[in-house]
Image (cartoon, rainbow, N blue to C red):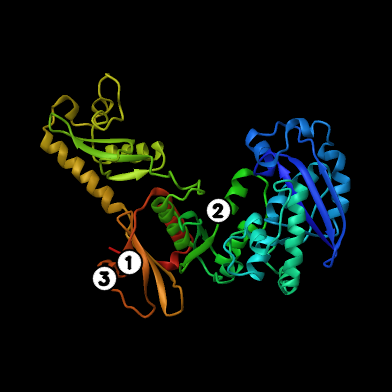
């Protein structure tokens, strides 16, 4: 049995909107068996633009039952039937959400007449309900009302069956079919073409623009997981409606997928990515010369126009490092902004400062120690390569860290003999980096020390 459904609502997503009208037509695949149709009191005002579209006003629904009053009946009609609708996930998400609020768990197989129409009538100019019905000569006398649109969907469904669509219906209702839950505009074949390997995937809108970037250990499984639930919130529903195609790039390892995701989100700035967009190293260690000729070290928030000696996620991390340099190289706490008051220099009092803060030590001598401190810091920063699996057995992947910064990553032949880091660079692509990406690499290197090759 098929339950061919149409609803009218106060808005485009179930979590913050409500049903104003519902129509259900039970159909056995040959003919209509019975139908149910009712206005529904939504418990909220109907927006004016919705009233203009549907003709359903607040006055019309004032005396109608609320959904809770008809929930048991609606559930009984739907629970043992295949749920059929034009853009099925929209209608299904509303009814599932409102039924759940009333204590009923709807878990039906679904058929989308948009997807069925594409398969059965390829080449139609459009598959919206109004346009496909016009293409097939189906009239809709009561457009944008639940009963009228449900009747049109019934006629469309019957034409699909007459045109040999039963084979497509059987395919869609198979247990492993993706047709029941995929976004309305996404061809199922694109999901089947995704490999089951690590990589980065891109969701594109109707114009081909990237609207979301994600990373995966298994591309096909991860992309499928986006569509395996039909959350009723606005963001999820809007997101699904805007997905028209998928592209991907495979990577040798999950780590490289993580890194490439960070890079691509910053490069493409997709509309539906939230995390990683604004991640930047928060603090930097800077060196500059004051008007008296003394080199000054300072840890402060990142400045776009200046290049830091090193960057830190946390202020405390930077201050701890700077204190260590001050102690090891007899630098002045005041000139390094560790001591910011007007009292006497604590380093001078403790015999750990040579008086640069009071001009007792000439700038040249002091600056040589500052340069030595910075040089020691840079020298202490690690330089190493992570060698790992490639995208296929004939290659291996490589990530190069040079003096604490990510130089780049790429792939080289599995039998390549690399003698030094400079030779390796010819195989790599340079990428921008940040503390988050660096942290991922350091954690991975610590976890898998055998994959790390240190360079002098």
Q: Residues within 10 Å of mark 3 (few under 14, many from 20)?
A: few
Can residue 110 be seen in this snapshot?
no
Instruction: Describe the element under mark 2 as helix, strand or loop.
Output: loop
Q: Quick one: SS at disc 3?
A: helix
Q: Position of residue 364 (x, y in %)?
A: 11, 37
Which is in the foreground here, disc 2 or disc 3?
Answer: 2
Q: CA distance from mark 2 to mark 3?
A: 45 Å
Q: Which image quarter: residue 118? A: bottom right
State which tag comes first along the sequence, 2 or 3.
Answer: 2
The residue most toward the top is 342
Q: Which residue is under mark 1?
A: 428
Q: Which is more toward the observer, 395 or 163?
A: 163
Among the 4 quarters of the image, the one containing residue 431: bottom left
Q: Which residue is mark 2?
A: 242
Relative to 328, say whether 125 is above or below: below
Q: Is residue 453 above or below residue 60?
A: below
Q: Say which residue label 3 marks.
A: 423
In this rendering, would 184 be left or right of 271? right
Q: Specify which label sits upstream in the sequence, 1 or 2.
A: 2
User: Marks 3 and 1: which is nearer the front?
Assistant: 1
Depth order, front residue of 34/356? 34
């Amino acid at each position: 049995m098929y339950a061919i459904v149409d609803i009218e609502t106060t808005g485009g997503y179930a979590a913050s909107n409500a049903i104003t009208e519902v129509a259900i037509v039970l159909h056995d695949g040959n003919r209509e068996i019975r139908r149910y149709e009712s206005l529904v009191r939504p418990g909220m005002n109907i927006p004016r633009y919705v009233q203009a579209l549907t003709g359903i006003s607040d006055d019309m629904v004032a005396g109608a039952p609320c959904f809770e009053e008809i929930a048991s009946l609606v559930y009984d009609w739907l629970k043992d039937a295949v749920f059929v609708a034009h853009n099925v996930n929209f209608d299904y998400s509303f009814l599932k959400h409102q039924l759940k609020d009333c204590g009923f768990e709807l878990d039906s197989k679904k058929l989308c007449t948009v997807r069925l129409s594409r398969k059965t009538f390829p080449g139609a100019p459009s598959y919206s309900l109004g346009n496909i019905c016009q293409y097939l000569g189906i009239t809709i006398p009561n457009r944008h009302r639940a009963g009228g649109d449900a009747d049109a969907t019934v006629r469309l469904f019957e034409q699909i069956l007459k045109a040999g669509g039963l084979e497509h219906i059987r395919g869609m209702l198979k247990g492993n079919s993706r047709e029941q839950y995929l976004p309305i505009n996404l061809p199922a074949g694109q999901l089947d073409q995704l490999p089951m390997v690590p990589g980065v995937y891109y969701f594109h809108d109707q114009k081909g623009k990237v609207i979301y970037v994600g990373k995966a250990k298994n591309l096909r499984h991860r992309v499928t997981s986006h569509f395996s639930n039909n959350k009723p919130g606005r963001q999820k529903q809007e997101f699904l409606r805007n997905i028209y195609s998928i592209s991907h790039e495979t990577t040798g390892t999950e780590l490289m997928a993580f890194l490439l995701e960070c890079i691509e989100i910053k490069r493409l700035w997709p509309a539906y990515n939230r995390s990683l967009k604004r991640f930047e190293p928060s603090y930097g260690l800077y060196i500059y010369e004051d008007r008296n000729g003394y080199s000054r070290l300072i840890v402060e928030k990142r400045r776009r126009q200046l290049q830091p000696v090193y960057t830190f996620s946390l202020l405390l991390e930077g201050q701890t490092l700077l204190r260590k340099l001050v102690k090891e190289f007899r630098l002045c706490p005041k000139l390094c902004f560790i001591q910011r008051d007007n009292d006497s220099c604590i380093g001078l009092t403790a015999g750990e400062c040579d008086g640069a803060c009071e001009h007792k030590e000439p700038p040249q001598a002091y600056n040589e120690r500052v340069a030595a401190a910075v040089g020691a810091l840079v020298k202490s920063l690690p330089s190493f390569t992570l060698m790992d699996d490639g995208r296929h057995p004939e290659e291996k992947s490589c990530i190069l860290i040079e003096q604490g910064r990510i130089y780049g990553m790429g792939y080289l032949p599995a039998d390549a003999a690399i003698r030094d880091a400079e030779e390796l660079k010819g195989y790599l692509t340079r990428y921008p980096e940040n503390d988050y990406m660096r942290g991922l690499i350091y954690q991975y290197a610590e976890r898998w020390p055998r994959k790390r090759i240190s360079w002098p």
